[in-house]
Amino acid sequence: MQPDVMSLLLEAGMLLLVGMSVVFLFLTLLIGAVNLIAWACAKFPEEELSVLNQPRNRATPAANQSGVSAPVVAAITAAVDQYRRQR
């Protein structure tokens, strides 16, 4: 029974080494790819989309159809605008 156990332990050790080597190789390639992409993005930057800088077409609220007064609508609009700028 001893030789059988030894061969199983040897096979388990080989499987462990092969598995860990594959994981190490994959992670090394992944880190290299991420660094390569970061280098390429820094070297060749694209033009930033100016969507954020364009003025938005905001719909004007209907003239008191909802029954909400104009100062309340203005306060809510200002709060939403401030929230969007912070996020």
Image (cartoon, helix red, strand yellow):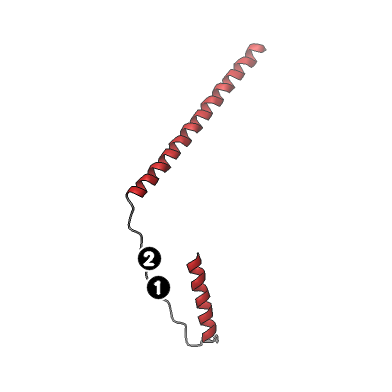
Q: Residue furthest right?
A: 1
Residue 2 in percent (x, y) is at 66, 12
- Give left or right: position of 43 versus 29: left
Residue 51 bears which disc, if any? Answer: 2
Packing grade of label 1 (10 A; few <14, some 14-19, many >=20) is few
Q: Which residue lies at the image location 43% right of the left edge and 36% below the top edge?
A: 29
The three-letter code of the residue at mark 1 reads: Arg
- Secondary structure of the residue carrying tag 1 is loop
> What label sits on residue 56 in the rendered view?
1
**Amino acid type, mark 2:** Val
**23 in relation to 35, above or below:** above
For this rendering, which residue is in front, 86 or 10? 86
Q: What is the secondary structure assignment of the residue under circle 2?
A: loop
Q: Quadrant of residue 30?
A: top left
Q: Residue at x 36, y 49 (%)?
A: 42
User: Is the residue 33 above or below the residue 9 in the image?
Assistant: below
Percent x, y for residue 1?
67, 12
Q: Does residue 52 lie above or below 34 as drawn?
A: below
Q: Say which residue appears at 53% left-offset and 85% top-offset.
A: 71
Q: How many marks?
A: 2
Q: Earlier in the sequence, mark 1 or mark 2?
A: 2
Mark 2 Cα-neighbour bin, 10 Å: few <14, some 14–19, many ≥20: few
In percent of width and height, residue 57 lies at: 39, 75
